[in-house]
Amino acid sequence: MGRGVKAAMSGAWIRWFTFGATIAWLGGGQNAESRFNFGSYYASHMVLQKQPSRAVVWGYGVVGATVNVSVWRDDGIYSQQTTPVQEGVSSGITGVWQVSLDPIYPGGPFFVTAEQRLAAGMDRVTLKDVYFGDVWVCGGQSNMEMTVLQVINAREELSLASHYPYIRLFQAGLKESFEEQNDLDSISVQWSSPTAEILGNGNFTWFSAVCWLFGRYLYDKLQYPIGLVASCWGGTPIEAWSSKRVLSRCGLPMNSTNDDPRHEVTGPHQPTVLWNAMIHPLTRMVLKGAIWYQGESNAAWHNAEYNCTFPAMIEDWRQAFHQASGGSSEVDFPFGFVQISAIRHQVPDDSFSWIRWHQTADFGYAPNLKMRRTFMAVAMDLGDEKSPYGIIHPRYKQDVAYRLYLGACAIAYGEKGIVYQGPFPKDLQLKNSTELNIIYSQELAILELSKDIFEAKWWRMCDAGLLAVQTRGSWLPQVKH
């Protein structure tokens, strides 16, 4: 499917939401009495998870009614399911319906029509321009929230938006709740094709640069639709994105707050409030995987517990999405994350160093025994002391996204011979009391060497004297900007 192919349109009855500022979800339907509609994050222009998964579609209706959901286009019906409307649990909503579609190969466009049959008649809602492909959730704090407008070569990156009409974007609105919500209360970007205006709306608004660039690299490789779902909020600790189950597992209290003077609170930090409002509502959505960029806000809060909370959160998300989707999201779906970068040449303490270590559950690499089917984008070398957005916000998001992409190729898509991890130590030689040689070795899966593949050597001073580090083998270069 080429980039220039235009989506087919039809004269079918359409109900859809337009992109604008933050959209409050009202739960309305074709008529106010029936309250019949899709869930908030089902809209025209969306991407649903392709085969072999069975994408889930759900919405609101009248208890006792029957709902028929069909996926169709001019050449026929691709999936058709019928289900009764069950008692709902959302405030003001009388009933909820949910179906799992037949597996559908990547492509489109399709129409998705839901019809509610009552004794008094029928309601119908149709989504247009729906594609099937891979859906990825992008979560975390401000480094995930940074937009394409804020990266190196932003103008060039924004100019490419129109070349990728089959990447579709969605962003949850900023909301918090002390109770688990079953639907989003706010949407910042309803499902849309990428434009420069959406990708570069402003600073720390939408759309996530790491999420977008990761999806773009995936599309270039896979050549089928990619759906990107951003749910992120700057200045937030992992506890806010975690359920009560995670906190209990890691021995953390539910009512804890961060009073450490080193930590500037810029976003919600109460435990569970973002899991409740911005992740739990998405759990019925069928995913291919998730990527995560967070950790800075835990440098001065529950730092030592991060080696428990992070792997526990990953497993908890996996279980929740798997169960809510009726088993359609894999119980161990791929989960990528970004190592927090260096922030300055001299730091007042070692809190960031410990967070980096704890990001890997104290293994130093991913995947590992406690973090299966994970992949890490190393970012230690991507510090940006001159960043106008603050030293903890490096602008080199192309490199971050490309390294995540390499990990996804290996872990999520099973591609062999992909070099997606940094070099592992091969040998350690203590020459004397002041000199330690660490030898690394790594072979690249390439047939031809070029000037872009290089040997690296570096030296740095330690308190004990001179430390020499030499690599033998090849490293991957940075992405050219």
Image (tube, helix red, strand yellow):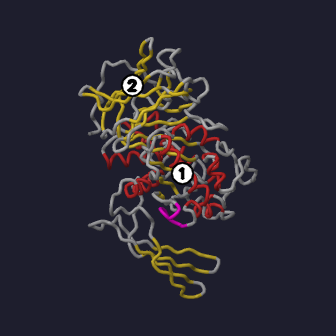
Q: Position of residue 94 (x, y in %)?
A: 56, 23
Q: Which mark is residue 312?
A: none
* Residue at the disc numbered 2: 68
**Upstream in the sequence, badge 2 or badge 1?**
2
Is residue 235 visible from the viewing direction of this image? no
Q: Which residues are magenta?
A: 363-370
Element marked by disc 1: strand
Residue 210 drawn above or below residue 2? below
Residue 120 drawn above or below residue 409? above
Is residue 265 visible from the viewing direction of this image? yes
Q: Which mark is residue 293?
A: 1
Say if the magenta span includes residue 366.
Answer: yes
User: Does 356 sit left or right of 77 as displayed?
Assistant: right
Residue sitting at x 62%, y 60%: 352
Q: Nearer the viewer, mark 2 or mark 1?
A: 2
Disc 2 to disc 1, C-alpha distance: 39 Å
User: Does 393 sit left or right of 259 as displayed?
Assistant: left
Q: Position of residue 52 (x, y in %)?
A: 34, 45
Prevailing secondary structure of the magenta residues:
loop
